[in-house]
Amino acid sequence: MVTHPDFRQQGICKTLVYIVSTQVMQSHTLKCLVLEADEEYVAANIYKSLGYQETERAMSVCWYDKSKW
């Protein structure tokens, strides 16, 4: 999700994440909702501010053949 610069820091994204999360949890009677974000990106802080907690970390390593670039 990207917020236009003129509308940042107004709680728009946080409100949207809250409303959608609440509706999904209620309409599908879920017990758990998993959100994923880069820990250094603003989304992680938005999720934490809404009460989501980090429970796991995923890491990956990519390799590519430099001779083909």
Image: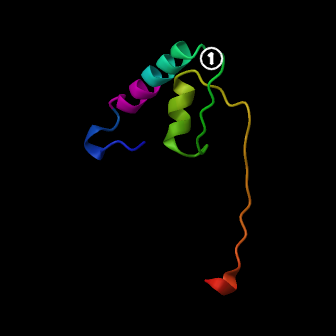
- Check disc 1 and report its element: helix, strand or loop: loop
**Residue 27: % across, % down:** 51, 15
Quick one: quadrant of the N terminus?
top left
Name the chief secondary structure element in magenta.
helix
Considering every residue shown, the one lying at the far left of the view is 6
Instruction: Tell me which residue sits at (73%, 50%) in the image.
Output: 59
Structural crowding at the residue carrying mark 1, measured as other residues with C-alpha within 10 Å and reported as few (<14), some (14–19) or many (≥20): few
Residue 13: image quadrant is top left
Report the amino acid beneath label 1.
Leu
Residue 28: image quadrant is top right
Identify residue for label 1: 30
| 11 within the magenta span | yes
Q: Is residue 22 left or right of residue 16?
A: right
Quick one: quadrant of the C terminus?
bottom right
Q: Is residue 15 left or right of residue 31?
A: left
Q: Which residues fall within the magenta stretch?
A: 10-17
Instruction: Tell me which residue sits at (25%, 42%) in the image.
Output: 6
Q: Is residue 63 left or right of residue 29?
A: right
Count of labels in the image: 1
Instruction: Tell me which residue sits at (53%, 34%) in the image.
Output: 45
**Residue 42: % across, % down:** 49, 41
**Residue 49: % across, % down:** 52, 25
Considering every residue shown, the one lying at the far front of the view is 28
Whether residue 63 is situated above or below residue 42 in the rendered picture: below
| 14 within the magenta span | yes
Whether residue 61 is situated above or below residue 37 in the rendered picture: below
Instruction: Tell me which residue sits at (62%, 17%) in the image.
Output: 30
